[in-house]
Amino acid sequence: PHATTLVWLHGNGELPQEYTAMFDRAFLKDHPHVRLVLPTPPRERALVTDPQLWFDLDESAWQRRFLGGAYDSAELSQADFDVMQQIEEAADWAAACVEQELRRAPASRVVLAGFAHGGVVASYAAYTKLSAPIAGCVTIGAPVILPQLLAARVKAPLRGVPLRCLGGAADSV
């Protein structure tokens, strides 16, 4: 039986199975009490072009618009709202996976994490979608997408969820 759950959301264009060997080598073989959950994006979504994607985003255009620190004053376009709808749908799906794990392990032993776009969805779900605070949220190489919309949706009881954001020295996020 497991006592801890890690729900891991892969990056866009990746398969969750690509992470199995890495997690096995890194820590699962030495920590059999940890359950690893590797969900895939939901299948039925109107605006997403590839079923392996959590959401569609032209990252180079997004970086030009928002990474200069001007996102608070940037006018939001229909494309921004479409991305937000896709993130909402993916976060609903991720939250449902976490809620299922909360029936198996206490919230204090459940972590939601993700890489790149999976990290975006993980952080959004951890702060806006869950029924209870979890042990933590970890993102790796994940930008904060449309923080002015995220801030308006954070649930008060979830504000205290610990967040660890990791990135490489050459990351532009």
Image: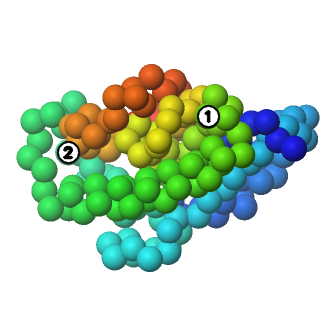
In three-dimensional space, the C-alpha distance between marks 1 and 2, rounded to whole angstroms, equals 37 Å
Q: Residue furthest front?
A: 103
The quarter of the displayed image where residue 125 is located: top left
| SS under mark 2 | helix
Residue hosting label 1: 107
Count residues near mark 1 (Cα–Cα under 10 Å), then give few for <14, some for 14-19, many for 20+. many
At x 34%, y 35%, the residue is: 155
At x 26%, y 34%, the residue is: 151
User: In the picture, which quadrant includes the C terminus?
Assistant: top left
Marks 1/2 in contact by CB < 8 Å: the verdict is no
Residue hosting label 2: 65
Task: In the rendered view, tell whether residue 150 sits above or below residue 12.
Answer: above
Q: Is residue 116 visible?
A: no
Task: In the rendered view, tell whether residue 158 sits above or below residue 119.
Answer: above
At x 91%, y 35%, the residue is: 30
The quarter of the displayed image where residue 56 is located: bottom left
Along the viewing direction, whichever of 90 and 101 lies nearer the viewer: 101
